[in-house]
């Protein structure tokens, strides 16, 4: 009598884990790509500002 609902709950839990695992992997993949892109842009901005300072750039 109790085994039926427990079995259903275990099946629902397994389905939830099977759904969540790819979602977490995709989230981590895209988050890492985003962090790398931000780092590259920050490095570019730093290098650009350093070059501008070397050329004695005077902004408007």
Image (cartoon, rainbow, N blue to C red):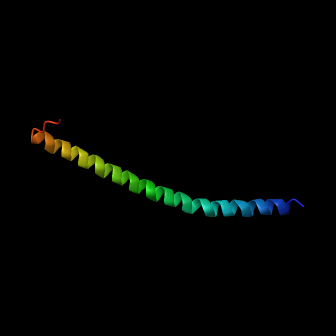
Residue at the location (10% across, 38% down)? Answer: 56
Q: Is residue 57 above or below residue 27?
A: above
Q: Quadrant of residue 21?
A: bottom right
Residue at the location (44% across, 57% down)? Answer: 30
Q: Seen in the image, is 39 located left or right of residue 19?
A: left
**Disc count in the image?**
0
Residue at the location (50% across, 56% down)? Answer: 27
Quadrant location, the C terminus? top left
Q: Seen in the image, is 51 located left or right of residue 34?
A: left
Q: Is residue 4 above or below residue 35?
A: below
Quadrant location, the N terminus? bottom right
45 or 11: nearer the viewer? 45
Q: Seen in the image, is 60 located left or right of residue 28?
A: left
Residue 31: horizontal and vertical position, in percent?
Answer: 44, 53
Residue 59: horizontal and vertical position, in percent?
Answer: 17, 36
Q: Is residue 60 above or below residue 3?
A: above
In the displayed image of the protein, which residue is found farthest to the front? 60
Q: Seen in the image, is 16 located left or right of residue 51?
A: right
6 or 53: nearer the viewer? 53
22 or 4: nearer the viewer? 22
In the displayed image of the protein, which residue is found farthest to the right? 1
Residue 20: horizontal and vertical position, in percent?
Answer: 60, 59
């Amino acid at each position: 009598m109790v085994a039926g609902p427990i079995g259903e709950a275990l099946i629902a839990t397994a389905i939830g884990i099977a759904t969540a695992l790819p979602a977490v992997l995709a989230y981590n993949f895209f988050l890492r790509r985003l962090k790398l892109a931000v780092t590259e842009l920050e490095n570019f901005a730093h290098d650009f500002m350093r070059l501008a300072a070397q050329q004695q750039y005077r902004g408007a």
